[in-house]
């Protein structure tokens, strides 16, 4: 029988098992869908008004002004075409909001059995029950979420089953705070191993090691001093030492599919911004000046965001038994996080299938800090070994 995996729907989900039986619903936020539906109606109504006005008046203000020779603008989109575009956009938003609102998943747990009832947009609900003992572990994974050019990592904790159709969410959030602690707590509660997707496939962790400080775990490996001596790394990053400080930083931009996507966004929206400025007089015939100004601001903001997202580089500084993470943009570095060695609970290489990217995760009980998400797994293994060697000193 062919297995399938229906991806979890929402961005915020928590199965609270402190009181049994427990039940929670996995769905897209109703507030987001409500505003999407509302904006869809607004655009659709605006398109209808434009088409109705054009039909009743026979000529638009623009046609009258051009005919009287007030000025001779370049050819622009007609009122009728613009009205149809607004109607199509509005109808699309309404349909998409309705589609996501009608899909949801009800997850229940009674202490022994896991029950799921999945309501798709079309067709009958899919449901199943499975014993907790049949699950292989509690998996933590990252899912890349793209909203046009805006993107976030979605942290997902789930009960992992060899049958993909029986994978069950336990916790979903775009906030990395306390993710590792919840991952460990779910594994302890369910008496299942904590697992995650790494550069070498599925990796299982020891519950005992997860509760210990990472320096203690590293010392129990009895690694030789400077075990990285003689091992080289690629030219994508540089590792250097200055007095008692050691630093790792990316040397240059690394282009991949999502870097090219940012380049495309900069090109398209930048051209649209320039065209909008050039067509300001025509836009003012149809829209209030403050709307045009907001339109300019929105386009420029998105272009700047895409550019900064393209050029941002990560830096790690090791000093005084601490890992200090910096982000560097346009030659300006700003401090992101400070992680004392004693607070560190793990250093993992994670794999995100949706982007085909790897990243280095620095885990504490309170947070998961992701760095170097554009480097290859070979580069990340060297950096991880470098950090482990520093902790082992």
Image (tube, grey):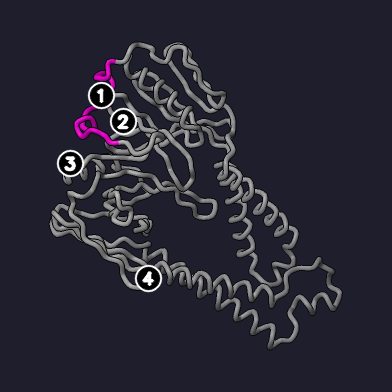
The quadrant in which the N terminus is found is: bottom left
Q: Between residues 253 and 1, which one lies in front from this camera angle?
A: 1
Q: Are marks 2 and 1 in contact (CB under 8 Å)?
A: yes
Cα–Cα gap, marks 2 and 4: 40 Å
Q: Between residues 167 and 57, which one lies in front from this camera angle?
A: 167
Of label 3 and label 2, which has the lower sequence position? Answer: 3
Of label 4 and label 1, which has the lower sequence position? Answer: 4
Of label 3 and label 4, which has the lower sequence position? Answer: 4
Residue 334 visible in the current orientation:
no
Q: Between residues 288 and 49, which one lies in front from this camera angle?
A: 49
Q: Residue at x 41, y 33 (%)?
A: 360
- Identify the residue under disc 1: 217
Indicate which disc residue 102 carries.
4
The quadrant in which the C terminus is found is: top left
The part of the chain drawn in magenta is: 204-222
Q: Do the residues labelled 3 and 1 touch (CB within 8 Å)?
A: no
Residue 362 visible in the current orientation:
yes
Q: Is residue 80 above or below residue 20?
A: below
Q: What element carries label 4?
A: loop
Q: Which residue is drawn at 37% across and 37% down?
A: 201
Q: In this view, does 233 lie above or below 357?
A: above
- Identify the residue under disc 3: 188
How many dots with numbers? 4
- Identify the residue under disc 2: 346
Tell me residue 19's x, y (percent). Answer: 13, 56
């Amino acid at each position: 029988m062919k297995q399938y995996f229906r991806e979890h729907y929402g961005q915020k989900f928590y199965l609270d098992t402190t009181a049994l039986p427990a039940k929670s619903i996995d769905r897209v936020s109703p507030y987001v869908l409500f505003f999407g539906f509302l904006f869809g109606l607004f655009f659709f109504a605006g398109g209808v008004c434009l088409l109705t006005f054009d039909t009743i008046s026979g000529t638009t203000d623009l046609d009258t002004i051009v005919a009287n020779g007030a000025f001779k603008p370049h050819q622009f989109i007609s009122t009728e075409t613009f009205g149809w575009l607004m109607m199509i956009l509005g109808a699309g938003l309404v349909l998409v909001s309705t589609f996501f609102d009608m899909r949801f998943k009800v997850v229940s747990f009674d202490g022994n059995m896991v029950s799921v009832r999945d309501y798709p947009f079309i067709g009958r609900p899919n449901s199943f029950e499975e014993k907790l003992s049949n699950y292989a572990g509690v998996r933590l994974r990252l899912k890349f979420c793209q909203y046009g050019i805006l993107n976030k990592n979605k942290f997902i904790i789930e009960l992992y089953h060899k049958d993909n159709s029986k994978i069950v969410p336990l916790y979903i959030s775009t906030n990395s705070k306390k993710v590792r602690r919840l991952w460990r707590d779910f594994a302890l509660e369910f008496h299942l191993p904590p697992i995650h997707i790494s550069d070498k496939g599925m990796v299982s962790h020891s519950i005992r090691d997860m509760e210990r400080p990472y320096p203690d775990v590293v010392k129990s490996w009895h690694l030789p001093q400077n075990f990285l001596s003689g091992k080289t790394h690629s030219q994508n990053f540089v590792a250097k030492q200055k007095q008692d400080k050691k630093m790792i930083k990316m040397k240059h931009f690394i282009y991949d599919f999502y870097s090219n996507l940012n380049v495309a966004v900069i090109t398209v929206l930048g051209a649209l911004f320039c065209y909008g400025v050039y067509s300001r007089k025509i836009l003012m015939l149809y829209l209030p000046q403050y709307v045009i100004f907001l339109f300019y601001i929105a386009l420029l903001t998105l272009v700047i965001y895409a550019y900064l997202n393209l050029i941002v580089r990560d830096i790690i500084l090791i000093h005084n038994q601490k890992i200090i993470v910096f982000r560097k943009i346009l030659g300006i570095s700003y401090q992101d996080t400070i992680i004392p060695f004693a607070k560190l609970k793990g250093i993992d290489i994670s794999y995100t299938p949706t982007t085909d990217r790897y990243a280095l995760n620095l885990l504490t009980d309170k947070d998961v800090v992701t760095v170097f998400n554009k480097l290859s797994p070979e580069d990340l293994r060297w950096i991880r070994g470098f950090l482990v060697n520093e902790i082992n000193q």
